[in-house]
Image: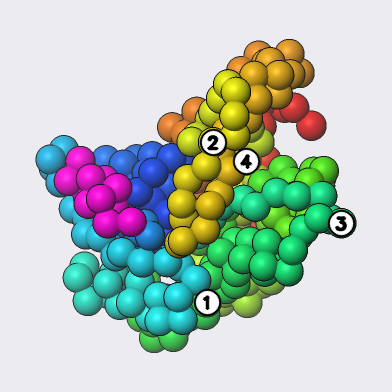
Amino acid sequence: MKTLDGNVALISGSGRGIGREVALKLAAEGASVVVNDVDKEPADETVADIVSAGGKAVACIGSVTDHDFADRFVATATDTFGGLDIIVNNAGYIMDNVIQKMTDDQWQNVLDVHLQAPFRILRTAQPYIKANPTDHHRKVVNVSSVSGVYGNPGQANYAAAKAGVIGLTKTLAKEWGRYKVNVNAVAFGFILTRMTEAVAGDDTYVEIEGRKIKVGVSQDIMSAVKRTNPLGRPGTPAEAAGAVYALCLQETNYVSGQCLTVDAGSR
């Protein structure tokens, strides 16, 4: 028997990067997974990879910031798989700038995707969780960041949103304990994804929801990470997913309201 057999998991932003690795890991351990991405192709690819490996998955395409998204997301789990046991709020992107140059849109867009979207998803899930008690503990894992714990220059919007995620986590741990739900956060350090891979020369951008988002870091920053990180390297998405998986296990039923820092001891 696999560790997550019979569980149904919602994972936002799971078409790429850390979210994809979380989806693959939870599915490999027996969970039925609802995969989400704003773009259809990466979500469908993740679903196909899970199914080809013998797992169960469906896609829920769309932006987590859309008003109707949370309803669709939760309904996809309950209607397709008949349950809801694990919620991983992972979707997000960055729009960095020093505060005097940061626009209202840059501020609000980042708060919307990193803080308002998880709030809406969890608010929508609450009636189902309350009405459908289980013998096992349900799990919520909200993705925060070391920026939300310690701050980071140029990331006032992102740091504020990720700090808010920790506050949301600690509050829901107190509100939802009565329903046998563990609510925790993970604060990732430097994890190698398309947002953080080293790039040379001109700035590199991708388009997300019609917005140009700068991705990648300079070779100098990557070199500094390798010098200062106790392990001498960035983390991998699979390693990040391992931390999320640990918080989804029944063995962690007495762990709630916590923020697990995943940065190789850098801070």
Q: Disc 1 and disc 2: Cα gap in Å?
A: 31 Å
Mark linked to residue 120: 1
Q: Tell me the kind of residue under disc 3.
A: Gln
- The amino acid at mark 1 is Arg
Q: Which residue is mark 4?
A: 188
Answer with left or right where residue 14 lies relative to residue 205: left
- Circle 2 crowding by C-alpha within 10 Å: few under 14, some 14–19, many from 20: some
Residue toward you, 230 or 101: 101
Q: CA distance from mark 4 to mark 1?
A: 22 Å
Residues under labels 3 and 4: Cα distance?
26 Å
Residue bounds of the magenta highlight: 39-50
Q: Is residue 253 left or right of residue 155?
A: left
**How far from the left and from the top, in percent, is residue 35?**
31, 56
- Quarter of the rendering occupied by the C terminus: top right
- Residue 250 at what x, y percent from top left? 44, 52
Question: Label 1 to label 3, Cα distance in Å?
Answer: 30 Å
Question: Quick check: marks 1 and 3 in contact, CB under 8 Å?
Answer: no
Question: Which badge, 1 or 3, is on the more N-terminal residue?
Answer: 3
- Residue ID at (46%, 81%): 67
Residue 232's place in the image compared with 143, above or below, is above
Disc 3 designates what residue?
100
The residue positioned 62% from the left and 51% from the top of the image is 94
